[in-house]
Image: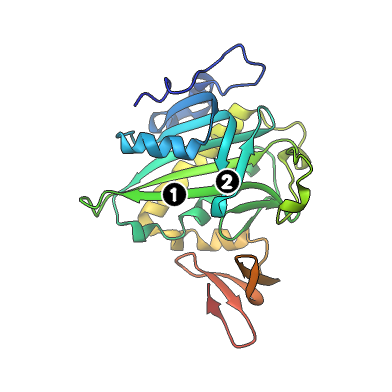
Amino acid sequence: MSLAAVFRMDASSPSVLIDPVRLNALLGEAHSRFAITALAECPSTNTFLLACNAQGAPSGSVIVCDRQTAGRGSRGRRWSASPQASLTFSLLWHFDCELVRLSGLSLGVGVAVVRALAACGARGALLKWPNDILFHDAKLGGILVELCSDPAQAQQAQAVIGIGLNLLPPATDGLDGAFMMPATSIDAMISPVPERNRLLAALLVELAAMLDRFAAAGFAGLREEWLACHAWQGRAVRMLRDGRVETAGTCCGVDADGTLLLQPPEGVVRC
């Protein structure tokens, strides 16, 4: 499957496409680890990259999309992205291990995102288990990690890592009440907003470093850094299932495998 031929790329569009040439220059020595395709529009970068993976796309393949029309968030929620107001992309990464070894990967991705934002001057981002990026208790972005493997190759696993960040306040179209928390954007953290090529380069550099560390030590090697970014550490929380409270207690962080630790009155439990 040709990554570039599936969707039309319109250089005359008023939106600002990522420039792979400029991006490669910003990546420096890390540029050889990625194969980047910039699209004007696609339904979902994760869905597209999963299809590319099935056709043998190499590790390090990146799809970055200017306008995402049917993006997917956690638990099937829709994540839409509009030109200039957001940065949405997906990264394919191969691992020489079984799928079970990838427990906690979405938390590690969150650590890389916080590092990259800080490197661009946008400091103060925090993380909510398992896949939300927050600023002042409002949602700045999200992570969607989808895992796959070939049953015939049990020691080979692939991850498609989708990341969406709000650069400017997202349009809610009167649906504010439909979201579990208010939305925010990078322009609330820093002005002017970092140029998208620079931001994406910082994200990819930090992701590569984190994924190398994760491959060597799993989430356990990133746990302390994640806890330092944990937005709700020591706070009272409720765990919901299908909109109903399943349990409540104090949030005690995460275990070495990325499992959430919650302390209701009867003692600490793994969620």
| Secondary element type, mark 2 | helix
For this orientation, the residue located farthest to the top is: 12
What's the amino acid at mark 1?
A: Glu
* Residue bearing the label numbered 2: 113
Q: Nearer the viewer, residue 259 or 111?
A: 259
Residue closer to the observer: 153 or 41: 41
Report the mark closest to the observer, 2 or 1. Answer: 1
Q: Left or right: where does residue 172 sit relative to residue 148?
A: right
Numbered disc 1: secondary structure: strand
Q: Position of residue 126 (x, y in %)?
A: 66, 54
Residue drawn where x is 20% and y is 51% of the image: 152
Please determine whether, in this image, residue 85 is positioned above or below residue 257.
above
The answer to whether marks 2 and 1 mark residues whose Cβ atoms lie closer than 8 Å is no
Q: Residue at x 71, y 52 (%)?
A: 179
- How many angstroms separate mark 2 from mark 1 (CA)? 17 Å
Q: At 66% from the left edge and 76% from the top edge, which residue is drawn? A: 250
* Residue 255 drawn at (x, y percent): 50, 70
Q: Which label sits on residue 127?
A: none
**Residue 41 picture location, percent across and down:** 55, 26
Q: Which residue is mark 1?
A: 146
Q: Is residue 103 left or right of residue 97?
A: right
Q: Is residue 76 left or right of residue 81?
A: left
Which mark sits nearer the N-terminus, 2 or 1? 2
Asked whether 169 or 221 is in front, the reply is 169
Toward the bottom, the furthest residue is: 266
Quarter of the figure with residue 11: top right
> Can the viewer see residue 49?
yes
The image quadrant where one finds the N terminus is top left
Report whether residue 234 is seen: no
Q: Amino acid at mark 2?
A: Val
Neighbour tally class for label 2: few under 14, some 14-19, many 20 plus, Cα within 10 Å: many
* Above or below 105: residue 94: above
